[in-house]
Image (cartoon, rainbow, N blue to C red):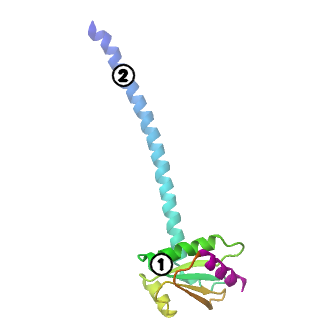
Amino acid sequence: MEAEVNEPCSRSRPIDTDRRGFISSMRNGAIGLVAVGGIGAYVVHLYRSTSHEHDLSRVGNGIAAVVQIHDPQCQLWLALQKETRHALASLDGDKPGYVIADIRTDKGLSFANKHSAKHVKLLLFDKAGKLRQVINGQRGSDELRQAFARLVAR
């Protein structure tokens, strides 16, 4: 008789647990898909942004350009990149394009050598691709913003 009393309880529990487990799995799966989708979208955005920033053919294409001669493993160059991005973001109106010549790539090194730019430098090009100014070394975002505004105003 005890078996009859326990039997219905034991049957209902796995069904109940299975339903809860299924619902929980579905919820966790949905959360996982959203997270993976979000990470995937971020990775795609990051890849596109990085590819765009490293496209040296953008120099002389009708938009003024700031080209940073860059080594991603050097802290001085990373600090200049941070200040440059901050200065560009704070500009009102038209903004020059931002391009990175990574000296650890063949194209970036070739570009740097072509312009005799060996160390922490920003090369400012007008819309036609003519080199207008070379900024050597680390600079603050206020000084860079003024230089970028003058470049765009030409």
Residue 139 lies in magenta, yes or no? no
Which residue does the image show at 37% across and 20% down from the upper left?
12
> Where does the magenta region start and end?
141-154
Q: Left of 114 or right of it: where is 146?
A: right
Q: Left of 82 or right of it: where is 87?
A: right
Residue 148 lies in magenta, yes or no? yes
- Classify 10 Å Cα crowding around label 2: few (below 14), some (14-19), many (20 and above): few
Residue that numbered label 2 is attached to: 13
**Amino acid beneath label 1:** Trp
Q: Residue furthest top?
A: 1
Residue 88, labelled with which disc? none
Residue that numbered label 1 is attached to: 77
Front of the two marks 1 and 2: 1
**Amino acid beneath label 2:** Arg
Residue 140 found in image quarter: bottom right
Which residue does the image show at 50% across and 63% down from the upper left?
44
Residue 151 found in image quarter: bottom right
Residue 72 found in image quarter: bottom left
SS category of the residue bearing label 1: helix
Give the dominant element type of the magenta stretch: helix, strand or loop.
helix
The C terminus lies in which quarter of the figure? bottom right
Which residue does the image show at 43% across and 82% down from the upper left?
105
